[in-house]
């Protein structure tokens, strides 16, 4: 049976996924409508990556001290406010402010994942992290389809108003979650984190950052590629986004039982399929199949967190997850910048570059995963 609070978070994320899915695939196109060039779009998305990064480790540390629930509540409320700002923006500058504020609220990721781990009951860490992610992406199956229809009928801006309504419902739900088990989050019981002296954790942290960079590189400008180079209409791009979200959900549900090391490797390989098909694809069918395998990105991120639990103490979970999300955020900062440069030179080169990096990472990850998986620093954290 699914633990009550885990299920509540998952359904809140399901609704949030519908709302976020309505605009996320059209955001680069909306920036283009504001007059932003591919390089400018890359810089804006890179700046969003900065906003997504700066609060990750502090939020994780705070989660270890006061518990994750208050941090989660704050993020939900601030994200709702940021969406209202984006919806009401009348200039590119004001919209970017809202976009950056929305990115800042991603500080919820580490506390939320720490919360899910703490309320998982007898569930494995892998399953506790992948199920909510899968339901979030199930919501994002519906979101892009609705967003595409709204965008073609009333314009992209109107999408944000509908998203704000859904976010309000999701926020109401999240306020019903119960407090996480206190024994892991009271300051009197929390040991001083020692993560910077943990070579296995630091090695994994570097691997996660490089992997996230390589997997995210082909994603930010793909909607622009599909519209400008392939000539797809907005509703078709929305449908491809929905297929991508369906892939996220099904891959998360179907492969969430894998061990963290193997799941991490599998997700990386699936994103390689996406890059290859976007690079060589000549039909909507090929692009649709490629988008389905975007689910490998979220699988890799969830498995990276579960992987880290092999090497840390339970009292370090919030900070450890926060540092991982900081590393992910740094990757998200620089990947769009490189993508913008590559896109201006040759749009398809973005996918070739990503594919080469992914192949290298698969070789490296395959070489080290067995040794790391069989020698965990803290075996009790695997359950």
Image (spheres, rainbow, N blue to C red):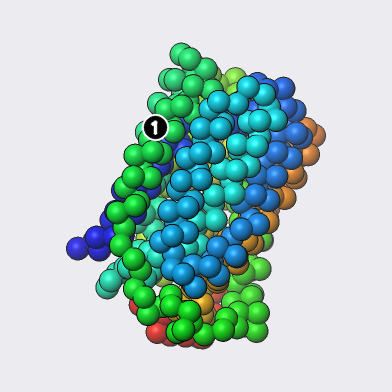
In this view, the residue farthest toward the left is 1
| Residue displayed at 51% across by 32% down | 84
Can residue 157 be spotted in the picture?
Answer: yes
Q: Which of the two residues, 74 or 43, is positioned nearer the viewer here?
A: 74
Residue 357 in which image quadrant = bottom right
Q: Mark 1 points at which residue?
A: 165
Can residue 127 be spotted in the picture?
Answer: no
Determine whether 22 is above or below 211 in the image. Answer: above
| Residue displayed at 65% across by 49% down | 51
Residue 145 x, y percent position in the rendering: 41, 27
Quadrant (top left, top right, bottom left, bottom right) of the N terminus: bottom left
In this view, the residue farthest toward the top is 153
Asked whether, in this view, residue 21 is left or right of residue 92, the answer is left
Q: Which of the two residues, 61 or 206, is positioned nearer the viewer here?
A: 61
Residue 283 x, y percent position in the rendering: 53, 27
Residue 46 x, y percent position in the rendering: 70, 45
């Amino acid at each position: 049976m699914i633990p009550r609070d885990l299920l509540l978070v998952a359904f809140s994320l399901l609704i949030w996924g519908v709302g976020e899915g309505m605009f996320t695939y059209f955001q680069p196109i909306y920036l283009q409508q504001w007059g932003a060039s591919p390089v400018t779009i890359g810089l804006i998305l890179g700046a969003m990556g900065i906003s997504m990064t700066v609060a990750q480790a502090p939020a994780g540390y705070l989660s270890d001290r006061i518990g994750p629930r208050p941090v989660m509540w704050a993020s939900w409320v601030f994200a709702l406010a940021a969406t209202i700002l984006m919806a009401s923006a009348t200039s590119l500058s004001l919209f970017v402010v809202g976009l950056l504020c929305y990115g800042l609220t991603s500080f919820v990721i580490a506390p939320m994942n720490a919360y899910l781990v703490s309320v998982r009951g007898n569930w494995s860490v892998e399953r506790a992290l992948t199920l909510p992610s899968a339901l979030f992406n199930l919501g994002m199956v519906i979101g892009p389809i609705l967003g595409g229809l709204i965008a073609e009928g009333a314009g992209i801006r109107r999408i944000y108003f509908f998203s704000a309504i859904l976010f309000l419902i999701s926020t109401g739900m999240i306020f019903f979650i119960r407090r996480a088990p206190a024994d892991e989050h009271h300051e009197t019981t929390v040991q001083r984190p020692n993560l910077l002296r943990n070579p296995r954790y630091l090695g994994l942290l570097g691997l996660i950052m490089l992997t996230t960079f390589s997997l995210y590189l082909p994603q930010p400008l793909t909607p622009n590629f599909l519209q400008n180079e392939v000539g797809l209409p907005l509703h078709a791009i929305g449908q491809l986004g929905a297929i991508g979200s369906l892939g996220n959900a099904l891959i998360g549900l179907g492969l969430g039982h894998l061990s963290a090391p193997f799941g991490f490797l599998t997700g990386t390989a699936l994103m390689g399929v996406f890059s290859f098909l976007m690079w060589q694809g000549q039909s909507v069918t090929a692009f649709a199949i490629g988008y389905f395998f975007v689910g490998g990105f979220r699988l890799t991120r969830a498995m990276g967190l579960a992987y880290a639990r092999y090497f840390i103490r339970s009292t370090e979970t919030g900070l450890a997850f926060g540092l991982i999300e900081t590393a992910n955020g740094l990757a998200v900062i620089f990947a769009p910048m490189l993508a913008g440069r590559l896109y201006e030179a040759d749009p398809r080169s973005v996918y070739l570059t990503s594919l080469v990096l992914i192949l290298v990472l698969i070789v490296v990850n395959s070489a080290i995963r067995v040794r790391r998986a069989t020698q965990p620093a803290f075996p009790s954290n695997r359950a």
